Image (spheres, rainbow, N blue to C red):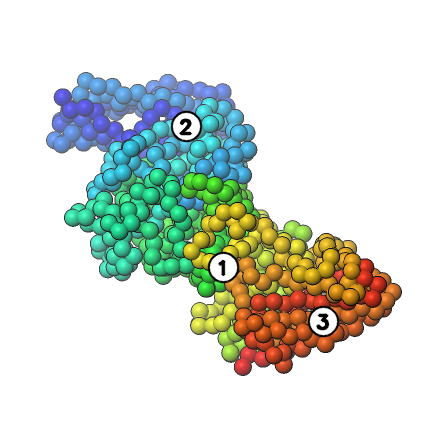
Amino acid sequence: MTKLSLPAWYGDKMVLQQQVRTRIYGHTAPSSEVRLSLERFPSGRLLASTQEAEYGLIFQESDYAEADGFFEFRLPMIEASYDTFRLSIEAGGERRVFQNIYFGEVWLAAGGSNMAMPAAYTDVAAKAKQISPDSGLRFFTQNEFGLAAGNKQYSYQPQGRIYGGHWIDATEPDKIQGLSALAVAFAMDIQAELNVPVAVFSLACPVSMIHSWLPRSVIEEDVLISNHIREIHHYRDEDNWNELPAEDRSDERFLNRTATSRDEAAEDILFHLHNQPAALFNHKLAPYTSLGLRGVIWYQGEEDVQYPDYYRRALRYLTAVLKEMFQSPVSGIYFIYSQITPRLSSVQDPSRLAYFNEALTAVRRQLELRSGIVTNYDLPLTFQPGKGLYNSPDTPRAKQELARRMALVALGLAYKQDNMPTSAPECIGAELVGNKLLLNFENAGQGIRLRAGETQVKGFSICNQDRHYVLAEAKELYQLRVIVWHDEINNPLSCAYAFWNFNQEANLVSSQGIPLLPFRLDREQANWEKPRQWAACDALEAFRFPITDPRSPRMGGKATPGIYPLWTFTNGRGRFNLEKENKRQGTASILISYSKADERPLRFGPVLDYASDYPPLDLHLWEELHCAVFNTEHRVKTLSLDLSDANGRKTVSAAQEIKDILSWQKISFKLKDAPVDLMRLTKLEFVLQDPDAEGLIYLDQIEFTGYTPF
C-alpha cells in the first residue's frame, strides 16, 4: 500500500494565508478515493470578519487520485481570525488530522547571515520574551543548513523533504529565541498593527550566496550567471557535486566553526557545500512550492558584495522564481529587502559597498514582485565577539529597528495603509538653481527631516566637471526638498549622498525614521573625498575597524572592531569633553581641559590610522585649514599645525595667536605650500601653548577651503 504523502510543512499549529484558495495536495495509492474536510471552532476573540462565521464542518470534498497517486484540492477563501480550524485528509485507508490551524498573514523570511541571526544574539531577545502564549504568532523553521543532523551532502535535485521542520508558537519561548531575529520582530510588529494571526517561515542560511538560492534551470540558461559561478570556483554539476576543493577543505572548517576568517578584500571566496549552485533552492525553497504567502522578507548579499551587477541580475531571477512558486492573494506577493550593513569589505576602496547597495536600490523597479527596500546604515555595528557564525560587525546585534522598518514598508506596500511607506525615502530628481542643486524625494512620509537630535545636514558630496566629489553643505527646505552646495564650486555637475562604505554620519530620514537611500546623480567615473567625522567636532568616539591588515578583519583583543576615540593626545595632559551649549555649529563642540602646556606644548589631533577611515588622509584638494576656537581665559595662547606624511616628512606651521577675547575666533593654516605629501598624511596635530600651563579651550568646525583640484 502506498503511504499517504503530504507536503512536509503541513502540521498542527500551521497558519494558512487568508484570502487564498489554499492548494492542498499530496500522493497516495493510485486511483484511490481521497476525502478532505475542514472544521472551524470559535475562539472567543471576534474580529469583524468573524461576526457571522459558521462553525463546525464548513467544507468537505472528495475525489480520486490520479494514476500516479497525485491528488489536489482547493480550500475556500477564508478571512483571518483567531478561530481555530481542523483539517482532515483520508486516503488509501490512512487518515491525517491537523489541529489548531489559523488563517492569517503568512510571510517567508530568507537570505544570509543577517536574516539567519537568532533572536537570542540580538536586541530582539528581550522583545521576543514579551510574546503572549496566546498571541497567534507562529513560526515554521528547519535545520539551519537544510540538511539532516550529521549529514553534509546536498541533493542535486529539488527536495520535498524538510529536515528538522516544525511549527513553533509562543508556548515555546526558548525555541523562539533560536529563530531569525528579523523574522520574529517583523511578525510581532505586523501582528500588533493588523491584529490577526501571523506566521513566518524562517528559512535563512548563514554565509549563503545568491546562486545557491536559484534553481538549476535558471543558472544553466543564463551564461552570465553560470560563468560567474565558474569564475569564483563554486560551480558544480553532477560529476563533481558535493566535492570540496582538495587544497583547503574549506567547508569542513566552516561546518566545524573553527575556520579562521578570510581576507575580505580579496576576490577569492571560500567554498562551502551549501553554496553549490541551487543547493539551498533544492533544500530550503523547493519543499514549499505552492505555499500561500503575502510576501517575502529578504536580507542577503554579504557574500556577494564584490559583484553588484551580477547580483542585480540574479535578484531579478530570484523574484521571478518566487512569483511562480508561491500562491498569493489577488494582489500578488510582495518582496521587502534590506541594504547591506556598513562593513570593511575592502581596505582599498571606500565605496565598494556603496556600489553594491546602489545596485540594490536600482533593481527595485526591475524586480518581478512589487518590492520595497529599507536602509540600515545608521544602526549601531556593535556585536558579540567570540566563536560561531555571528561574531563580527558584519552581523550586528541591532535587528529590532530594521525589522520595524521592514514592517512599516509591508504595511504600506502590501496592506495599503495610509501614510505608510512603500520603500525607503529616495531621491528622484535634481535641478540646478544658481550654484546649488535642489533635490526632490519620494517615500518620505510627511517629509524629509534630520535624525532626532541633529541640527546640521551631513553626508552630501558635490562635484563639478573635474569629477572630484568633495564634502558639501546641505539644508532641508520645509521638509520637502534638500538644497546642496559648496561655496567654491560654482557650476555643480552632480552630487551624492552617503556614498561610502561607512556612512553613519548621513542623517536624513523620512517622517517614519527610515534613512534616505544613498545615491549619486550619475554613474560616471569619479574621485571621492572621504568623510572626516572628526572635523565636525560633535563626537568623541565612533565605531571603527582599527587595523589596516586586510588579512585579519575579525581580530581579537584590542584590535577588535568597536567603539574607538576619534581624537587623541600625543603629548601633555588633557581631557576631551563634548560641550552642547557653547558651540559654533552642529550639535556640540569639543572642550579641551589641559595642564602643563607651557614648556612642553599640548599636542592633540584626530586618529587617522583606522582601517575604516581608509588612511592615509588626503587633503591635496585644499589650500587652507580653518578651525573655530573659544578662549575661556583672559590671556593669549598660540596654536600651530603639525603634519606628517607616509614618507616620514614633517612640518610645523607658524604659531597662530589665540586672542584674549570671549567669543569664537577663526584660526587658519596654510596647507598648499607645506613640504609634505598632502595626499598621504599620517598625522594632523594641533600644538597648543599656554604661558599659564593649565586651562580650557573649545574647538569646533574644522573646515577646508581653497579648492584646487589640479
First along the sequence among labels 3 and 2: 2
Local secondary structure at mark 2? strand
Evaluate if marks 2 and 1 touch, with contact meaning CB atoms under 8 Å apart.
Answer: no
Q: For this rendering, which residue is in front, 68 or 617?
A: 617
Q: Is residue 243 visible?
A: yes
The residue at the point 66 percent across, 55 percent down is: 540
Give coordinates of residue 225: x percent, y percent. 27, 57
Rendered image: mark on residue 167: none
The C terminus lies in which quarter of the figure?
bottom right
Q: Which of the 4 quarters of the picture holds residue 544?
A: bottom right
Give coordinates of residue 383: x percent, y percent. 52, 44
The residue at the point 21 percent across, 19 percent down is: 94
Look at mark 3 in the image and give the residue it sits on.
640
Local secondary structure at mark 3? strand
Give coordinates of residue 167: x percent, y percent. 38, 28
Q: Which of the 4 quarters of the picture holds residue 479?
A: bottom right
Q: CA distance from mark 1 to mark 3?
A: 29 Å
Q: Amino acid at mark 2?
A: Ile
Q: CA distance from mark 3 to mark 2?
A: 65 Å
Local secondary structure at mark 1? loop
Rendered image: mark on residue 168: 2
Rendered image: mark on residue 548: 1
Give coordinates of residue 396: x percent, y percent. 50, 45
Left or right of residue 551: residue 93: left
